[in-house]
Structure formats: C-alpha cells, structure tokens
C-alpha cells in the first residue's frame, strides 16, 4: 500500500560520535521509518532519507532521481557548502556522467593498477622504516594513515611531492563541515587553479597519469576544462581523505577486536574478505552524501515521493540491513557473500574502489607483519575523534609495539 499522507520531519544534526558507534537516528529509521523525511543543519526545507538496502539500490540507479537537478538548489544538507565543484561528475546524470566516468576509468586500467601497486609497496616500506626508526609510541595517523593514501592519490594524479602538503590542506578544508562556507569555497577555488595549471602543463608535456588523461580528454573535446578540473579535485579529495580515515578506522577496529586480529594474523589469505567486512561494518561517514531530486512522483518502499523533492540514500544503513546481512551489528570475517555498498551503487559507484581496497589491504596486512606487538598506546576512551568532519576517523591514533 502506498503512503501519501505527510510524514513527520526528523531534525537530524548528526553527533560527533566516537569510535565505531553507529548514529542512533540512522539505526532507528532503518528499523522503524525506512523512508523518512529529515532536515539537516544547512540548506532549506526537508528531504527524504531512504535507509533499507533494496530501496537504497533502487534510488541509486533509477533515472527518475537526478543528481544534476540538485545544482542551484539550497537542499537541506550537513555541510554549509556543496563538496563537488560546479559541473563536476558528482552533479552529473547519464549520459554526461557516463562520458566523464569513461575518462577517469582510463587511469584505473590493469597496467596503471600494477604500476600503482609497485609504488604503493615502496611508499609503505619507506613509511614503516621511518616508524621503526622513530620508535613507539607514535601517532599512526601522522606516520602512516595520512601520508600513505595522500602519496598514492598524488602519484595517480601526477602531483609532485613538494605539493603534497598543500593538497592535504585544501582537501581537509573542503571536506570539513566546520571550516565554514567561505574557507571551503576559497579552498575549492585554489584547488581549481592548481589543477588548471597542472592540466596545462600536461598538454605541453604529456605524462602517464590522471592529469595527463584529463588533459588529453580536454584536447580531444571529450571534456570541457571545468569538467576535467572538477573531476581532478573530486578524485583527489575522495581518494586521499576517505582512505585515510577508513583505514585508520580499520586499524582501530582490529586493535579493539583482538580475536579478529589474531585470526587474521593466523590466516593471511583471509585479508581481502576481512577488508570487505570491515568496509561493510565501519560507519565511515557522518550523515549522507549528495542528494538526488525526484523528477516525477515515485513510489519507494511503499511511500510516494513527490516530484521535486530531494532524496538521500544511506549506504551505512543499507550495510546494516538485517534482511540482507545476518547479525549486521557483528563484525564477521566469515560473511560470504558480502554484497555491501560501501563504495556506493549504480552510476556513482566509486571509480577508485580497486585502489582503495589495495591501499586498505596493504595497510592492514603490513602493519602487524612489521610490528607484531602493535597496540594502542592509550586507553580506548582517551582517543580523540574528529569533530565536524564529513568522513569519520580518529584525530590521532597513538600506538606502540
């Protein structure tokens, strides 16, 4: 039966949660009100929030829900600003989205991934050597979880090492919900200027990196310059920031689940399956990402969503849906199959998922090989977690061995 009466609006100001705690409102809506109306701290009006697995997948692929239609609207949202730049792939629908995705996919070929895997091992070995030389205790965020994915994304993009710190600063400012609109928009502008210049250099001196691929696409007329720059910024921020925090969350999860850690150390072949389960289990972001707009009246989960209304999907709750995942609150390395949607679903599925898995597996697999006694250097309740962040993770992760 389709529901057409006005649903209550839940005001949702996501709390800064510690560790792997799950958002209590998300948990309640998943089980009690799976197609609900919410209002977030910024923007205007309300939006629909879809939380169950099948309905999340449905909204993610149905062309009647448009990302492009979000542009120019002050949709209710967590951050005071939109993360994607104007004209970026995040705001695009097929066929424009498909056209832009094809260009980015050229940077993730088997050949490129092989080259990146070799580079990743070199970077990892260098960072672990530096950790051993420093000795414990130390902050794992500063020594590994921050510099490793940053170096990997900069290598993919073609950003020289001298500019890594600048890229990290801009990324942190853009992705923060607490930096404020002015600072975030200024960081996006500076990011855009940087990549406009880098793509210009690649047109004069082509190289086998993502900046080179994007510059070639602009020359061929496949992309407009602003589209290429928007893609560069989004990939750079997403790849560096998300893996940084999520890999730290994985380390924390293993440090606080000693039985799982012992099993993984005893069965190294379990690593890919374990990382997949950690991706499902960890609530890696606060609230939700970018919304979509219903282009016509659409029924979702027995609720009629009117044309013009914004709609969010929660991949976090989809990964905890008990109709798909038995005992979803448990971390289970034997979960198979594991059809999680941690990287999204449909046209906006993360293009860098393979690289993110590679990095996560390398971090989790290498740390305890090199430091078998790795453990938290402070009691768990003394860890400091990021505040006002869109992607969740520890501020610092003190460890010793």
Image (cartoon, rainbow, N blue to C red):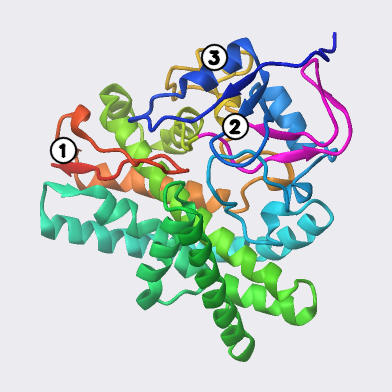
Q: Residue at x 49, y 30 (%)?
A: 13
Q: Residue at x 48, y 52 (%)?
A: 175
Query: Label 3: which residue?
Result: 28
Q: CA distance from mark 1 to mark 3?
A: 39 Å
Coordinates of residue 365 in the picture (x, y in percent)? 34, 44
Outermost residue, bottom side: 204
Q: Nearer the viewer, mark 2 or mark 1?
A: 2
Q: Which residues are magenta?
A: 287-315
In this view, the residue in front, 268 or 64, is: 64
Query: Label 2: which residue?
Result: 315
Q: Nearer the viewer, mark 3 or mark 2?
A: 3
Q: Is residue 269 left or right of residue 97?
A: left
Q: Is residue 118 left or right of residue 39?
A: left
Q: Residue at x 46, y 74 (%)?
A: 159
Coordinates of residue 367 in the picture (x, y in percent)? 27, 46
Could you say whether the residue bearing mark 3 is in a helix, strand or loop? Answer: helix
Q: CA distance from mark 2 to mark 1?
A: 34 Å
- Residue 306: within the magenta? yes
Q: Please, is residue 400 above or below residue 108 in the view?
A: above
Q: CA distance from mark 3 to mark 2?
A: 15 Å
- Quadrant where the C terminus sits is top left
Q: Please, is residue 180 above or below residue 60 in the view?
A: below
């Amino acid at each position: 039966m389709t529901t057409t009466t006005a649903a209550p609006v839940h005001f949702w100001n996501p709390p800064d949660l510690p560790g792997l705690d799950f958002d209590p409102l998300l948990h309640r809506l998943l089980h009690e009100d799976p197609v609900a109306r919410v209002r977030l701290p910024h923007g205007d009006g309300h939006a629909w929030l879809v939380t169950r697995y099948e309905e999340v997948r449905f909204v993610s692929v149905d062309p009647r829900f448009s990302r492009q239609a979000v542009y120019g609207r002050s949709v209710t949202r967590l951050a005071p600003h939109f993360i994607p730049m104007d004209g970026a792939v995040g705001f695009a629908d097929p066929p424009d989205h498909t056209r832009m995705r094809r260009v980015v996919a050229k940077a993730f070929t088997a050949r490129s991934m092989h080259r990146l895997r070799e580079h990743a091992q070199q970077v990892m070995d260098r960072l672990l050597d530096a950790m051993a030389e420093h000795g414990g205790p130390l902050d794992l965020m500063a020594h590994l979880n921050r510099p490793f994915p940053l170096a990997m994304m900069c290598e993919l993009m073609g950003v020289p090492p001298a500019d890594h710190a600048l890229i990290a600063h801009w990324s942190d400012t853009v992705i923060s919900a607490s930096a404020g609109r002015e600072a975030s928009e200024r960081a996006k502008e500076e990011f855009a200027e940087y990549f406009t210049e880098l793509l210009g250099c690649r047109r004069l001196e082509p190289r086998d990196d993502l900046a080179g691929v994007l510059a070639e696409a602009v020359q061929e007329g496949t992309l407009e310059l602003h589209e290429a720059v928007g893609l560069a910024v989004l990939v750079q921020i997403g790849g560096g920031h998300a893996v940084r925090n999520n890999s730290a969350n994985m380390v924390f999860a293993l440090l606080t689940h000693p039985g799982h850690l012992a099993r993984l150390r005893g069965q190294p072949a379990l690593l890919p399956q374990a990382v997949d389960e950690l991706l499902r289990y960890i609530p890696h972001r606060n609230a939700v990402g970018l919304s979509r707009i219903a282009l016509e009246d659409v029924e979702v989960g027995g609720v009629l969503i009117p044309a013009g209304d914004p709609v969010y999907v929660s991949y976090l709750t989809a990964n905890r849906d008990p109709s798909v995942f038995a005992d979803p609150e448990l971390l289970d390395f034997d979960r198979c199959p594991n059809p999680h949607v941690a990287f999204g679903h449909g046209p906006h599925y993360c293009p860098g998922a393979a690289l993110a898995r590679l990095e996560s597996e390398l971090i989790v697999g290498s740390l305890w090989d090199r430091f078998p006694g790795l453990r938290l250097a402070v009691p768990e309740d003394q860890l400091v977690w990021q505040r006002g962040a869109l992607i969740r993770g520890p501020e610092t992760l003190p460890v010793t061995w």
